[in-house]
Image (cartoon, rainbow, N blue to C red):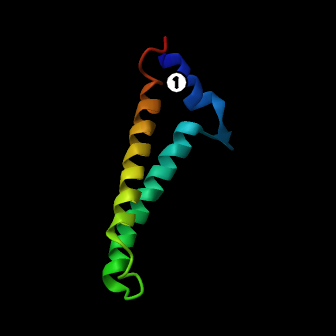
């Protein structure tokens, strides 16, 4: 099973020199940053005061799920591939 996940993570899809595992990591990092910036802007901007807290929560949950997927995919480079 590890070899299949490794093949998906590193050989199935790439955008330029970046394999899928790196792209998922970039998206997770971007979502974490959007979540932090959203709360910071919401405190200072009056037009974003009406934005529900659930938006921030779902962005954070999505980022955590993608980060876990990124971690498992990255670990396949070290586990069970011999």
Find residue 74 and report its image quarter: top left
Residue 5, given in percent of the width and then of the height, sits at 52, 24
The residue closer to the viewer here, 52 or 68, is 52
Task: Check the image and report above or below for 55 versus 19.
Answer: below
Residue 35, given in percent of the width and then of the height, sits at 38, 64
Q: Residue at x 41, y 19 (%)?
A: 79
Q: Residue at x 33, y 72 (%)?
A: 39
Residue 1, given in percent of the width and then of the height, sits at 49, 16
Q: Which residue is drawn at 38% across and 39% down?
A: 68
Q: Residue at x 37, y 47 (%)?
A: 64
Task: Assign a secondary structure to mark 1.
Answer: helix
> In the rendered image, which residue does mark 1 sit on?
5
The residue closer to the viewer here, 42 or 19, is 42
Task: Check the image and report above or below for 13 versus 28.
Answer: above
Which residue ends up furthest to the bottom in the rendered image?
A: 46
Task: Check the image and report above or below for 57 versus 40.
Answer: above
Task: Check the image and report above or below for 3 versus 60.
Answer: above
The residue closer to the viewer here, 19 or 48, is 48
């Amino acid at each position: 099973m590890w070899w299949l996940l490794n093949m998906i993570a590193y050989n199935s899809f790439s955008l330029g020199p970046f394999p899928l595992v790196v792209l998922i990591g970039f998206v997770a990092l971007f979502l974490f940053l959007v979540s932090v910036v959203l709360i910071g802007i919401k405190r200072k901007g009056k037009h974003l005061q009406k934005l529900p807290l659930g938006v921030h929560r779902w962005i954070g949950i999505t980022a955590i799920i993608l980060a876990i997927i990124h971690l498992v995919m990255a670990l396949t480079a070290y586990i069970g591939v011999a």
